[in-house]
Amino acid sequence: MEASLPLPELTPDETAHAARVLAHLVAGLQAAGGRWPFAAFMAEALYAPGLGYYAAGARKFGPAGDFITAPEVSPLFGDCLARQVAEVFGNLRAASGPPLTLVEYGAGSGTLAVQLLQRLAELGELPDAYAIVEVSAELRERQAEAVARLPPALAARVCWWPGHAAAPWRGVLLANEVLDALPVERLRIGGEGLEQRFVVASAAGLALDWQPAASALQAWFAEVGKELPLPLSLSLPVGTEFEACLAAGPWVQDALAQLTAGVALYIDYGLPRAQLYSPTRPRGTFSAFCRHRQHEDALWHPGLQDLTAWVDFTGVAEAGLAAGACVAGFTTQAQFLVNAGLDAAYAARLAGLEAGEPVEAGAATRALRLAALAQGAQRLLMPQEMGERFKVLSFTKGYDEPLVGFARRDLTATL
Ligand SMILES: C[S@@+](CC[C@H](N)C(=O)[O-])C[C@H]1O[C@@H](n2cnc3c(N)ncnc32)[C@H](O)[C@@H]1O
């Protein structure tokens, strides 16, 4: 992301769309009595049907979009995840039970679903069903288009669940960069106590305001610091800003409720709670993204930019435990990928490129493809890129085998 670049000029279509979103938000704000907790605003700005950022056809993913996610960076990400999934499926298949399902939450453009089905077919470990849980109708359509390009025997396995599993199931749950897209409340240690951000009406349409935090947030704040060496009220100086994702815990619990045997993997940028809520992060982690520019102005053309915050992985782990799951591993994305065979995946892709490159493709094209493979691996692994900022948290339920992705440098003790 390029923090220093100026925000882009809008096209006429974008200007018109931004005006429609703003009108929708102003009307919603008035209907809500003129004041929205930040999470309510964020939910509308991201997911209002036909208008919100994830629900209205913006390009979003990849170099031409606003941000780039790991499956879009390199197929090596899917290769390694497939190895982890195949290991679990192999063990589950050895025990008798109902069909195996791979459930992907928030499948974005469908890139990871396509990659996983292709790799799992090669590994002989296809799920009986690949179920996508996707909140955006527009993205469900995009995913269906991507899946339709697969061979029919693979495409036929894909289905879309309207929400969390409605019946017991076994298999693997994946959620890459979904937790960070759940609406957050934004908080500040004020001189008189905890404050929360509200979105209010203004002459320009919308404005941000700090007001005393609601009792539910006061209760969260008192509770969340209990396991830390110092309660947050003592460790964070006046003026410190941070976020609370109250939606994450119930969402994770509901997602795991019907899993009878298998593994869940949550991949996202985030930290254990003690590192996330820290004086070293005085402005918190909330960010807006537009065309690879990262900035803090949540009100810059709502509907045209992604809004996001880092994940409190301790909170996610607590939710999994409350759902009866065990924490089976926590590590950095780089370590997970290395543990799950990134070197072998890289060698296989390199050999495939070298063997498959037609002579007429020319030396320049060949060099470009080899460079793209190397750059993709670098981006997934490098600490200042995705390697360390992104973490992988896994849960197991009714499954006792070790997971290859956490074989080395398991950081569960830091949660
Ligand atoms: C940042 S994108 C990540 C997309 C994809 N996983 C990837 O790695 O490219 C977030 C995705 O989560 C979806 N999403 C957000 N909240 C969701 C929810 N509560 N349930 C299911 N999907 C959700 C969004 O619509 C979008 O597809």
Image: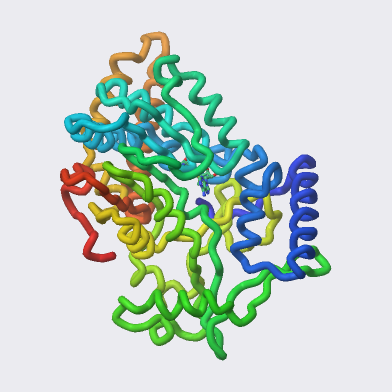
30 or 203, which is in the foreground? 30
Q: Is residue 293 visible?
A: yes
214 to the left or right of 179: right
Q: Is residue 4 visible?
A: no
110 to the left or right of 22: left
Task: Give the image quarter of residue 409.
Answer: bottom left
Task: Give the image quarter of residue 379.
Answer: top left
Point out residue 46 in the picture as x, y percentages from the top left corner: 62, 51
75 to the left or right of 48: left
Point out residue 122 in the picture as x, y percentages from the top left corner: 28, 21
Q: Is residue 121 above or below residue 95?
A: above
Q: Residue at x 19, y 34 (%)?
A: 91
Q: Residue furthest bottom?
A: 192
Q: Is residue 1 above or below residue 309?
A: above
Task: Give the image quarter of residue 71.
Answer: top left
Q: Residue at x 64, y 40 (%)?
A: 58
249 or 355, which is in the foreground? 249
